[in-house]
Every structure is written in C-alpha cells, then in structure tokens.
Image: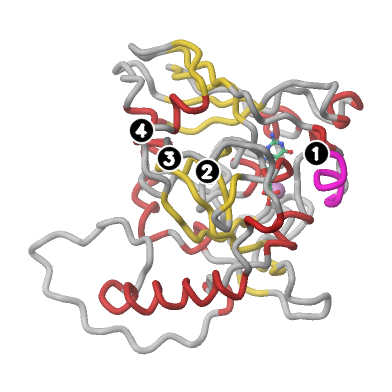
Amino acid sequence: MLIRQKPAIRPSEITPESQYLDRRRFIRSASLAGSGLLFAAGCSGAGDEPPAPAPAPAAPNEAADLTPNSFADITSYNNFYEFGLDKGDPARYAGQFKSQPWTVTVDGEAENTGTFDFAAIVGPHTIEERIYRLRCVEAWSMVVPWNGIPLGDVLRRFKPTSRAKFVAFETVVRPAEMPGQRAGVLDFPYREGLTIAEAMHPLTLLATGLYGVDLPNQNGAPLRLIIPWKYGFKSIKSIVRISFTETRPRTTWSDAAPNEYGFYANVNPDVDHPRWSQARERRIGSGLFAAKQPTLPFNGYGDDVAGLYSGLNLVRNF
Ligand SMILES: Nc1nc2c(c(=O)[nH]1)N[C@H]1C(S)=C(S)[C@@H](COP(=O)(O)O)O[C@H]1N2
Ligand SMILES: [Mo]
C-alpha cells in the first residue's frame, strides 16, 4: 500500500524544512528550464500561430513567488470553522479528531456509487507533490507543498453519467470532536461544489498530505480539496461525501451570505468583496509590516483555467 496510515505524525517524520527546500530547489532547477512553469498543464495554443516572441524578463513578481511557507505557519494559521473561528482554534482543538478509519460515500449521477474506505479511494493512485498558493478570501495567502492526486483521476473511477454536471462535497459532522459544530457557528455540514469541468481539471487536487506527511487534522485530514485558482473556502476539508449532480449544489458560504460569496469564487483582483478590496494580499509569514502583494487573476493560474470561463461574465458570476 502506497499510503502511510495514521498514527499521527511524529515530529521526527516531518521532513526538516531546510532539507525539503534544498530538494525543491534541485527539482525546480531541473524542471523549470524547459517550460518555465512547474505545473503548466499542457495548454499550448493553436498550431497555426507563429511562435510568440520571447517575453521580456518579468519584473520580480512577489505574488507569483512559490517559496513554501513554513510547516509551522501552514499548521498554525488555519480556517476550519468546525473547530472554531480563531485562526489558532484548529491547531488548538483538532487534536482529538479521528481521521482513521475514514470512509467516503459517493452518490448521485454515477455508475459506481457506494461507501468506500479511504484506502480504496486513494490506494490505486500515485501521490504527487504540487506547490500551490492558497489565497483566502480574507486577503491573505500562503504557499503550501501539497501531496495528493488529481481529483479527476479519482472521479473517473466512479464513472459519472452524462447527467453529472456538478460535483458536490461535504465535510464530516462530528460535534463530539469538533467544538465549532457544537457552537453552531455555520450551518453544518460544510458544503462545497464545482462544475464537472472544474472538478476534472488537472490542477484540481484531492490532497492527502503536505510537506511529505499525512494532512494534519487542522488542514483537513485525511482528504481535502485544493482548487488553486479559487478562494480558499472552496477547498473543503475532511471530505466524507462526493455527489455527482445534475443541478448546481448548495454551498456553505453562498448559503450564509449570497451577496458576498458566489458559487464560482475564482480569485479576481478586479472584483472586490462588498466589504474589502481583493486587489492585494498579505503573504502569511512575511511579517506584520511587509508590503501587501498584488493578487493575480485566477491566483496566477489563469493560463491554465481562464478557458473554463470563456463567455461567462465574471463580475456577475463571482
Ligand atoms: N470543512 C471546512 N473546510 C474549509 C474551511 C472550513 O471552515 N471548514 N475553511 C476554508 C477556508 S476559508 C480556507 S482559506 C481554507 C484554509 O485551509 P488551511 O487552513 O489548510 O490553510 O480551508 C477551507 N476549507
Ligand atoms: Mo478562506
């Protein structure tokens, strides 16, 4: 079996960051040479165009920097309302949470539905490493070296029917282990949804770990989504249900405040949240007085995903 199961991570198992970063530098220098982009998913243009002139060397763009945040930052500054509202609550209160054993129920418009063990969902796939920036709707961001599987590879095994136009996800409900659920700070279960094209897109990751270890509870153990071009709230944690649907599913944040949070939630510096600007972001760990960085359209992944929304008005469909 490819997957390391709990018991929970011992500190000795965590790749020391210095070692990790050295390894990254090596991998990046080996692979960046050709494509210029670590995860550009084969989106070359139409064949009849002349090759574009080489672009002028870009000014150093802080926002596009993919140097990972520290393991300490990534695991101590979290949004996981099931454990409370404060950024420190998930790390403080998620210790009692049991992410093993774990099952995921797959239902709706697919041929292979049922309840599957964690190992059956993840087992046949190779765990990859993807360094993605997570951009929270609250205008902060961090860069995380995730481990996981392209969600589409997993979903295809359930054989969605032609009626499957959306994929809906739910987080576990376990008030005994989740103080934020006892306090009722949101209408739980936490729900999210994607169009089938978004769910099948090769950048969309079903994450099982970070920094080479199993996901810490506060980051959504044992399975969570990462949709790098969308605001962080779309990246639902601790998933127990995946439903293929014909109609657009409900989602927690647009249920709670439909004028503030839309179904698409694509990162967009040109469409402000009604109560604050989305033009810039604070990189966690960069220090309280560090300058904010410009936010990039689609969080910097536009070359790969903008085509999913051609013809869609992104101001109205926020
Ligand atoms: N179940 C669940 N998933 C969730 C959330 C949540 O409160 N509950 N918060 C979201 C938000 S707003 C963000 S920014 C990211 C934060 O992920 P991280 O804590 O691993 O950085 O998780 C998202 N997934
Ligand atoms: Mo967020």
Q: From the image, tell me which residue sits under label 3.
A: 2
Q: What residue type is labelled 2?
A: Ala
Quick check: 255 left or right of 202?
A: right
Q: Indicate which disc, 1 or 2, sits on the residue closer to the N terminus.
A: 1
Looking at the picture, which amino acid does disc 4 mark? Pro
Q: Which sits earlier in the primary sequence, circle 4 or circle 1?
A: 1
Which mark is drawn over residue 124? 4
Q: Name the residue under label 2.
A: 207
Q: Which residue is denoted by mark 1 in the rendering? A: 94
Which is more toward the observer, 255 or 116?
Answer: 116
Residue 134: give its label.
none
x, y percentage for residue 193? Answer: 54, 30
To which quarter of the image does residue 30 belong? bottom left
Point out the tag, 3 or 1, that comes first from the N-terminus: 3
Span of residues in magenta: 87-95
Q: Where is residue 29 in the image (x, y as percent from the top left)?
A: 37, 79
> Looking at the image, which residue is at 67% across and 56% down?
272
Image-based side of 42 in relation to 215, left or right: left
The answer for how far apart the CA atoms under marks 4 and 2 are is 15 Å
